[in-house]
Amino acid sequence: MADSNAISQLTRGVAMDVQSLDSLKTASRHRPEQAATEAAQQFEALFIQQMMKSMRQAGGESELFNSNAMRTYTDMFDQQLASEMAAGKGIGLAEQLLQQLQQKPR
C-alpha cells in the first residue's frame, strides 16, 4: 500500500508534466499494474481537459476575461481540475482502459 501511494504522489505532482511521465515510466518497471492504473488516470485527465477546452471554446469568449494571462490561467486551472477529477472517481474512462489492457490475448 505504501508503494502505491508513493507512485501516486510521484505522478500527480503537477498534472501531466514531463517529470511525472518520467516517474511513471520508472515506476512501471517495478510495479506495472499500479503504473498502468496511473497511466489510465492520466489519459482520462487529458481527455477531460480536452473536453473542457472544447466546452469553453463553444461558449465563446467574454470581453471581460479576454487576455493572454486569463487564457493561461484558465488552461492551467482546467489541467489541474481534470487531473483531480480523474484521480477521484473520474468519468469511467480509466476503468475501461484498464479492463482493455488487462485482457489476456487469445
Image: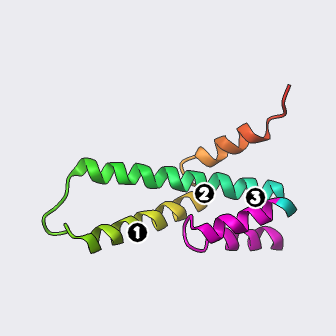
Locate the N terminus and report the quarter of the image it occupies: bottom right
- Residues at marks 1 and 2, CA–CA distance in whole angstroms: 16 Å
Q: Earlier in the sequence, mark 1 or mark 2?
A: 2
Please tell me which residue is depicted at 41% across the width and 63% down the height of the picture. 78
| 95 to 106, vertically: above or below | below
Please tell me which residue is depicted at 58% across the width and 46% down the height of the picture. 92
Q: Would you name the residue on which mark 2 appears?
A: 42
Q: Earlier in the sequence, mark 3 or mark 2?
A: 3
Name the one closer to the observer, 70 or 38.
70
Report the amino acid beneath label 3.
Ala
Residue 67 inside the magenta-drawn segment: no
Marks 1/3 in contact by CB < 8 Å: the verdict is no
Hey, which quadrant is residue 56 in on the image? Answer: bottom left
| 102 to 2, vertically: above or below | above
Report the amino acid beneath label 1.
Phe
Q: Which mark is residue 34?
A: none
Locate the C terminus and report the quarter of the image it occupies: top right
Q: Residues within 10 Å of mark 3 (few under 14, many from 20)?
A: many
Q: Residues within 10 Å of mark 2 (few under 14, many from 20)?
A: many
Q: Would you name the residue on which mark 1 appears?
A: 77
Give left or right: position of 48 versus 40. left
Please tell me which residue is depicted at 65% across the width and 51% down the height of the picture. 40
Q: Would you name the residue on which mark 3 appears?
A: 35
Which segment did they paint magenta? 1-28
> Picture coordinates of residue 97 (x, y %)?
66, 42
